[in-house]
Structure formats: C-alpha cells, structure tokens
Amino acid sequence: MNRIDAAFKKSKESGRGALLPFVCAGSPELDSLPQLLIALQSAGASIVEIGFPYSDPVADGPVIAAAMHDAIDRGITPEMIFEQVSSVRDQLELGIVAMVSVSIVIATGGPEQFAKRAREAGLDGCIFPDAPLEESQRLIRACKDHGLTTTLLISPTTPIERAKEIARSCTGFVYLLSRAGITGEQSDGPSDIAERVRVIRSVTGTPIACGFGISTPDHVAKVLRHADGAIVGSALVRRILEASAHAKTPEQECEEFVTELAVGSVSMDDIV
C-alpha cells in the first residue's frame, strides 16, 4: 500500500484527521529538509508536502514565495531535494509528496523522468498546482507507472461538474482550497467547506485534504469536521523562518508548532 493511502487509513482508524504540513525545500538553509522531516514525524504529521522552489510560485502568498526565492538564491535544485529525502527516508514512516510546478517537471526531463527519480528518492506522490485537467493525463500516467499518487487542486470557484472531473482524476487525496486567492495565514480561518466536500464525496472515495488559510488548532479542527486532512503551509514556513528570533532551531520550532496543530485533529466523533 502506498504510504499516502496508509496514512489516511491509519488516521481514519484512529478517529483523528490527517495533518499535512508543508515545508519549502532549501529553507531556511540549503540542507534543512532532512531534519525538518524527522521533526515533523515526531510531531505527529501524517503526510508532508515538500515545496519544490520555483521562481514564479503558483498561488503562493508572500511568506512561501519569499522562502522559495531565498532557497533558489542558495542554489537548491530538484536533485538536491531528492538526495535529501533519500538520506532520511529509512527513518520515516510518514508519507511524502512533492508540491511541484509542471515547469520544473519539464525542466528535469519530463513526467516520466521526474516520477522515476521521485520514487527512487522515496517520495510517495506529487501535487501539481498548475496542471490543467486537460493537460494532466501524461503526469497522472507517469506517476501511476512509478507507484506515485497524483493530486490536483479544486478551488471554491471551480464549476461543480469540473470539480467532479478533477476529483475523479486524483489518487492519494484531493486538494480542496478552502478559499480563493493565494496562500497565507487568515485570522478567521477557512471558509465553510461542507457542501464542497459533500459534492466531491459523491463522485470519489479518495480522501479530501483542505488547505489555504489554515494556521491554528481551531482551524484544523474546523476543517476536519468535514475533510479527511488539513494542510498547513504559510504559518509553518513563517514559524520556521522566525525560529532564531525565539532562540530555537528550525527543527524545534517546527516540531513544537505542528504538535500544537495536532491538537486540532482530535477524534472527529467528538467534534460538535
């Protein structure tokens, strides 16, 4: 069983929603990723999304965009990311997915080569945030051929019938945006996703994870009333970047924050 499928199965059996933190490879230092992955497992993460830095981030707000640009300036490359994941894969049980632009996939030899190298490194799936449904079949096929899951995004403005088609094409999990716009922390948290989740569940049994604007344990709990997983990105990246100001290492800040967020993934049977 793919580790993504296993992670959602385990969270469902335990009565807790899955927590999916996002980190940017190459940030805050070029070689930070391995220790961050270990810290995230210790904190209770189910699946980690690794952002592959891109010069023109898709839908990423200022915090993640800045982290990506800094990582690129330091010299991070896809091959370095693969090597860093591989170096600690045998210490990790959690699922790992690449959040990667199609442009990077093409630049590294195309879908087949990227999927092959990702699988060799120990990744379990890919999220393609800028892949239109009509142009995603080659990506989906390459991932399937190498045992990787494929996730596409559904926004609040995606027409219902198109949202259903996207959901049917996903494996591992469906990425549902809690709001339109770019990533970033929001004081009021995610919008009501109940109806959107209901529609998606009517056409697929694939788990649904919700992201954008989720930054507190309360936000996580609100999302998990309906979805199978909660994705936290900007808030975690900011905390990691600000770790030194709190006299902590990035790994310490990462583990402490995700442990706090995990409080929101309480038994879904107990949420009223």
Image (cartoon, helix red, strand yellow):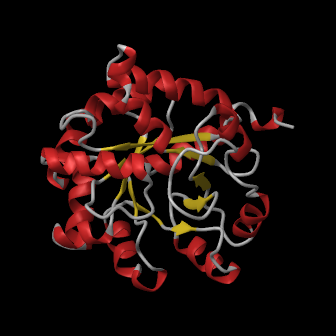
Residue 125 appears in which quarter of the rendering? bottom left
Instruction: Specify whether 115 is left or right of 171.
Output: left
In the rendered view, would you say 15 is above or below 1? above
The x and y percentages for residue 121 are 23, 48
Quadrant housing the C terminus: top right
| Residue 123 shows in this picture | no
Q: Is residue 189 left or right of residue 120?
A: right
* Residue 21: percent from left, percent from top: 48, 41
Residue at 56% over, 75% down? 166
Q: Is residue 268 left or right of residue 131?
A: right
Left or right, 25 with respect to 128, comes to left
In the image, 136 versus 180, the foreground residue is 180
Q: Which residue extends farthest right? A: 272
* Mark count: 0
Give above or below for 200 relative to 217.
Answer: below
What's the residue at 41%, 74% (across, down)?
Answer: 131
Q: Position of residue 178 (x, y in %)?
A: 64, 57
- Residue lying at 81% horizontally and 36% vertically, measured from the top left: 269
In the depicted view, which residue is nearer to us: 45 or 176?
176
Image position of 125 with respect to 76: above or below = below
Residue occupying image coordinates x 55% and y 63%: 181
